[in-house]
Amino acid sequence: MCTSKGVDASLEVSGPQMGSTIWLKSGQIVFAQSSGTLALTEALTQLGLVPDEILMELRQDGGGAFEDIIVSRNLVKPAVITYIRAFQTADTIYQILEWDRAGYEVREGSEATPLRFVHPEFLPMQYDWLAEVEQCGAEWGTIRQKVGSARAILKRGPNPEPETLTPQEKKLLDLVDGKRPLREIVLWSGMNFFAAHKVMTSMLDRMLVSPLDGERPGGKPRNMKSIQELMHNVVRLPSARSALLVDRQGKMIAESSSTEESATVSAEMASIFALTVTDFEQHLQVEEQAHKIEQILVEHKMGNKTILAVTPRVILAVEVDRDCDWGLLRLETSRTLKALHNHLGE
């Protein structure tokens, strides 16, 4: 039995602080929406497609007949509405995949939740959402952890050589202005929701974009105690003075030292370490893979040394005396940085 809106079932999903509805026809998803997803009015406003007078009319009418208004007046092409409905569906589905726990209720036939104010002819009826989830769902957790929340603000990094960018990367990079949130960038791109986020992950790894505030864009909360314990493994080495973990902008994340004096010196050196790595990479002639540098040795005039273990997101700097066991230091530094990945969401 089909409802008047062309669906025969709905799946109500209740998660942390929000609820979602997935509408189905013949076992296939045709639309999904949640309280945490952009409304059609919001999407069209962000895209600059809604005249002010229409917004005024919507406020007077309560907004319920919005789709009817824009359809009857030919204000927006049907393909644009279909794209936004697909965006809403993908945003909702992938939100659900992020939840640790959720409650589900299936409603069939006349009991299905009605598709109010939604025109079935503008829904992406032919798209196989279940196939996409089966193919991409397992990877989504890692992607979201790296790109951060939908509200994350990103800024551009150093301008890359145009020939190193794919068309998708160029499209997304052109939309990064330090003002638009991630969700709006993806909406503006016109790309597949999952594909856009995956490309953005690659751009973050290559430092083409970075979080506006210098913090990592996503991931689980840092366990600072565990991070410092891991760093202390390096500090315990013979001749080691201190270990310092900073992001690629030179902002301190954590430190561990054998003396209070070493901690003070390390804190002052945080930004210098970041600049050292940046300068080294800019002058290294290795195509586009400069971010794969693993270790850099910095020798100081006083004879002491600093080893910089580098990833695309962070730098682990370990200061040692001149008579250190270089092989042991390299091995332990590499082990420590790999272990730190579990706490940094990388």
Image (spheres, rainbow, N blue to C red):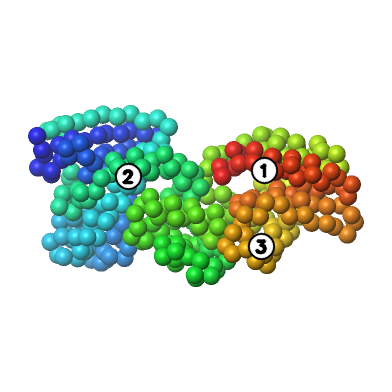
Give the residue displayed 12% in from the left and 61% down from the top: 72
Label 2, residues with CA under 10 Å away: few <14, some 14-19, many ≥20: few
The residue tagged 1 is 337
Q: How far is mark 1 from mark 3, CA to CA?
A: 19 Å
Choose between 129 and 294: the one closer to the eye: 294
The amino acid sitting under disc 1 is Leu
Tag 2 near tag 1, CB within 8 Å: no
User: Is 229 drawn above or below residue 71 in the view shown?
Assistant: above
The residue tagged 2 is 132
In the image: residue 6, left or right of residue 161? left
Of pointers 2 and 3, the one earlier in the residue sequence: 2
Give the residue displayed 36% in from the left and 52% down from the top: 193
Tell me which corner region of the image, top left, top right, bottom left or bottom right, holds residue 221.
top right
The image shows a total of numbered marks equal to 3
The amino acid sitting under disc 2 is Glu
The percent position of residue 269, horizontal first and vertical second, equals 76, 55
The residue tagged 3 is 281
Choose between 24 and 105: the one closer to the eye: 24
As drawn, which residue projects farthest toward the bottom? 162
Give the residue displayed 48% in from the left and 43% down from the top: 142
